Amino acid sequence: MTVVVLTLSACGASSQSVAATSAPPAASASQVTAAAAASTTAATAVTTLPAVKVQSIESRPVTSLQKFADDVAAGRITTLTTQCWTVASQRIVQTLTVDGRKAFLMAVSATPDAAQYGLEWSAGDTFVDVSWAELQSSYACPHISGGTAPTFPALMDASLVVKRLSARIGGGPFNVKDTEKNYPLLCDTFGDGSGAADAQEATLTAAQKSALTELAKSPVLSFTSDSESKGTLRLGTTSKPAVSVSMEADLCIDKIDA
């Protein structure tokens, strides 16, 4: 059995183990009907929250985050997952429950703090971080932590990075804007550490590409936090993996051993 291991590092990750298993048995006709009815009811019962004005500092433009916040207030979760395709859709859904939406809106209503990489808003135990690059985009997709947000990084985050990279290499990216220039997925330290970002993906070997493809297509993966800053995505259970992929805090890949 080929075994693929993907190791991530990220701030604030707690110890956990999550497994993705193969698809469940097909539902009966009555179950499908009930599920469809429940889905229709849920779709018509969206809780609309009061819109808020996103606060800023030093005249920093926050129009792009305002668009995200307006969709959060309106409960347009499908719009959020469609617009923010660089974020795992499960993370958005699990984070932006009604309580999560309230916490987010309260946070961005407060004056943010400026950091090296962007702005940070907070309210209680909810933190909203937006990079300068996202703030300059037409629609900002923030990183939300604490509160109702699932632990980061998790299986969903690691899987999305691998699937995006595999899709790009295969010529069918998730989005036409998902290019190496716009969204580097390989760290500057990848390979020889030269930081030649414009040539990194082209340097992947056939074995490395194959490993990424296997990870991207597998229906059975598991993710385990090794510490507060590292985690491992696994395909298979052998203690001696054939492939390992390391990731830094921003979820860029810095190593693939194949």
Image (cartoon, rainbow, N blue to C red):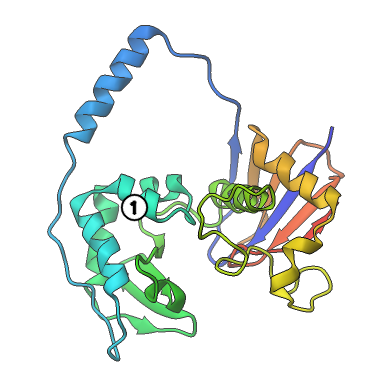
Q: Work out whether residue 57 can be spotted.
A: yes
Dot 1 lies on which element?
Answer: helix
Q: Work out whether residue 96 can be spotted.
A: no
Left or right of 12: which side holds 255?
right
Residue 71 in percent (x, y) is at 24, 56
Residue lying furthest bottom:
58
Q: Is residue 215 above or below residue 195?
A: above
Residue 68 in percent (x, y) is at 29, 62
Rendered residue at 16%/45% (across/down): 47
Rendered residue at 42%/71% (across/down): 134
Left or right of 49: which side holds 119?
right
Residue type beneath disc 1: Leu
Rendered residue at 30%/91% (across/down): 58
Residue 94 in percent (x, y) is at 38, 46
Q: Which residue occupies the foreground of this view, 189 or 155?
A: 189
Q: Name the residue under label 1.
A: 80
Rendered residue at 56%/56% (across/down): 153
